[in-house]
Each structure stands twice: as C-alpha cells, then as structure tokens.
Amino acid sequence: MVAGVLLLTAVWVYLLEYVPDDWDRRMLHQNPNRQLLAYTFAPAAATVLGVLLALGLVGGWVLAGRMLAPLARITEATRTATGGSLSHRIRLPGRTDEFRELADAFDTMLARVEAHVAEQKRFAANASHELRTPLAVSKALLEVARADPDRVTGDVIDRLHSVNDRAIDLTEALLLLSRADRRTFAREPVDLSLLAEEAAETLLPLAEERGVTVETHGDIAPTAGSPALLLHLTTNLVHNAIVHNLPEAGAVRITTRVRPGAVELTVENTGAPLAAELVPTLTEPFRRGAERLRTHDAGVGLGLAIVESITRAHDGRLTLAPRPVGGLRVTVELPAAPRADG
C-alpha cells in the first residue's frame, strides 16, 4: 500500500507539471486541465489502491499461513514434548530450507532426550534393584540373629559386614557416576602414564593372588582433567582386567601412547573369547557377563559404565574390542594437554 501510494503520488505530481491550471467549465471536455484530471484520476487511483489493499491482505494472509505452518507444527511438537510425550516427531516434508533444518534439529534433540530419559529410568530401576538386594539380605540376617540369640553371631556379623561393604561400594559408585555426568570437577594437568603405574602398583597384590602378571609401559601421556576421576578410571580398567582373566598364568598389559592431538590408554588382558555382540553391552550399568556373575568379586556392575562416563566427561572416546586370542582390549582416548609456550 505504501509503495502504491508513493507511485500514484509521483505520477500525479509529475503529470501536473504539464497540465495547465485553468478552470473553465465550458472547456472541461475539450482541453485537459488539473481539475479534470483530479475528477477522473482520483477515483481510479482510489479503486486501484482498494484492490491492492484487498489483494495484499488476502495474499499476505495466505502466504503467511503457508510460511508459518512449519512453525505451528514445531510449536505443537514442543507442547507435546512439554506434556511428557517424547516419542512425537515433526518429520517436516518439503524442500530443505531454514524451517526444515530447524524441524530436523528439533527431532534429533527429541530423540536424544528420549533416549537419555529412558536410560535414566532404566538406570534408576537397576540401581533400586541392586540396592534392594543387600538391604534384603541384611534384614534376613538380622531376623535370623534375633530369632536365635544364643547362636554364634560371628558368622552373621561377617556376612553383614560383607553385605554392607557391597552396599557402600554401590552407593559410592552411583555418586561417582553422577559426579562424572555433571562434569563438576576442575581440570588439571595429568599424566596417564603415571596413573597407569599407580593403578598397577595398587592392584599388584590382587594380581599376584590370582597369578596374573601386569606389564606397564609406554610414553608420557599428558592430558587435562580430574586426577581423582582419571585415577579411578585407570584403576577400574586394571581391576577388571585382573579379575576377568584366566584362572592362572593370565596377563594384563597397560600401554600409553601419544598421537597428534590426543593421548591413549590401552588396557588388554587374556581370557576367554568374547562374542562381538556382547562387547558393546559391557558399558551398560549393572550389565555383567555370565562368567562375571560366577565370581565372588563381580563388583557392582558399574565399572565400565563409570569408565565410559568419566571418558565422556573429559571429551574422550572409549573403545572396546575383543582380542582374537581371547580377552578384551579397552582403549581410552583423551585430548592431549596443550603445550606450554616458552
């Protein structure tokens, strides 16, 4: 409308420059003048502007509706997700434009949130189940002791102590996993090779008890992160490698190396061959293989889950691969520490 008014005004102004300004009703239909043009041009211009206004309103409403339809679908999907339904997807059809990219990004976000929520629910259910077991055992032992006070309680006390230790270990593992997921830690310079040596030295008595040899070698591997969390990561990997090994004459090999922009910690052990489809599931919380459940120190089922969480919190990558001759190879790749200038 503004453009139409400006156009008609420009035509009117420049047209009047060449029209005489004499008013004579007798010559009204013979010689054109400004008054004649005003009587004839103004109604036509008003009609044209009225048509432009109607077409502009109708056309603008139609175009705006078509352009904003994707936003309406995105808004509806947002309301649905706010209501708790995360399975809804927009799946916007049509050509790839800004609205299509926004809808696809929103669908990807919903898929990740849905997977995360499902994982959290499964984790909470598993944690509740795992915590309920030692509590139920403790309750049963206490009831036995109360029902028979004259019974020797040394065995009951030892079993209660063991059950409580397991519950404490599980609780501490859950807290550590939550801390790693929230990334509530300060980053400091850390050398993975020193952590590997410390973990191997700490677990050497356990390795000797099981007849497992531990070898540590490699390069200095500087990175940045939480020393406590990375030490826990290394200790968990070495402990798993020792426990889930051959009954006798097993071996654990710990290697650190530096690559462009990254450092690697690799822990591999001997053992029974592992199915390729089983290996990716070992990082799931409370997931244990059948051979692990038969051991007395199978742990709380959070070892590799904690390792994966700590690795992810340090912007790293965890890789698990079965060894062709048996056993497992676990590789943690972390960003290399920036080199100090000077």
Image (cartoon, rainbow, N blue to C red):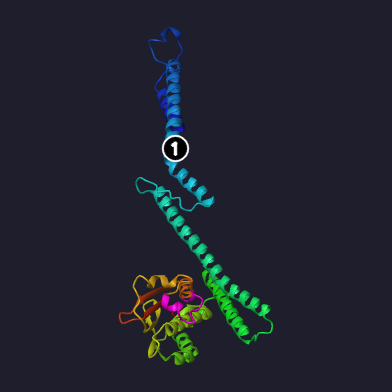
Magenta stretch: helix, strand or loop mostly? loop
Q: In the picture shown, does residue 245 fall above or below 76? A: below
Where residue 174 sits, quadrant-wise, is: bottom right
Where residue 272 sits, quadrant-wise, is: bottom left
Q: In the picture shown, does residue 12 fall above or below 106? A: above
Please state if 322 lies on the left or on the right of 161 as rendered: left
Instruction: Name the residue tied to disc 1.
Output: 65
Q: As rendered, which of 241 and 202 lies closer to the eye?
A: 241
The three-letter amino acid code for the residue at tag 1 is Gly
> Residue reaching furthest top?
26
Residue beneath the point at 67% across and 77% down: 147
Crowding at label 1, few (<14), some or many (≥20) Cα neighbours within 10 Å?
few
> In the rendering, at what x and y percent does residue 161 appear?
61, 82
Point out the stretch of residues depicted in magenta: 290-303
**Is residue 229 shown to the viewer in this render?**
yes
> In the rendering, at what x and y percent does residue 67 appear?
42, 41
Q: As rendered, which of 11 and 296 lies closer to the eye?
A: 296
> In the rendering, at what x and y percent does residue 299 appear?
50, 79
**Is residue 6 shown to the viewer in this render?**
no
Q: Secondary structure at mark 1?
A: helix
Q: In the picture shown, does residue 152 fall above or below 29? A: below
Q: As rendered, which of 152 and 277 lies closer to the eye?
A: 152
Residue beneath the point at 45% across and 20% down: 42
Residue beneath the point at 66% across and 84% down: 151
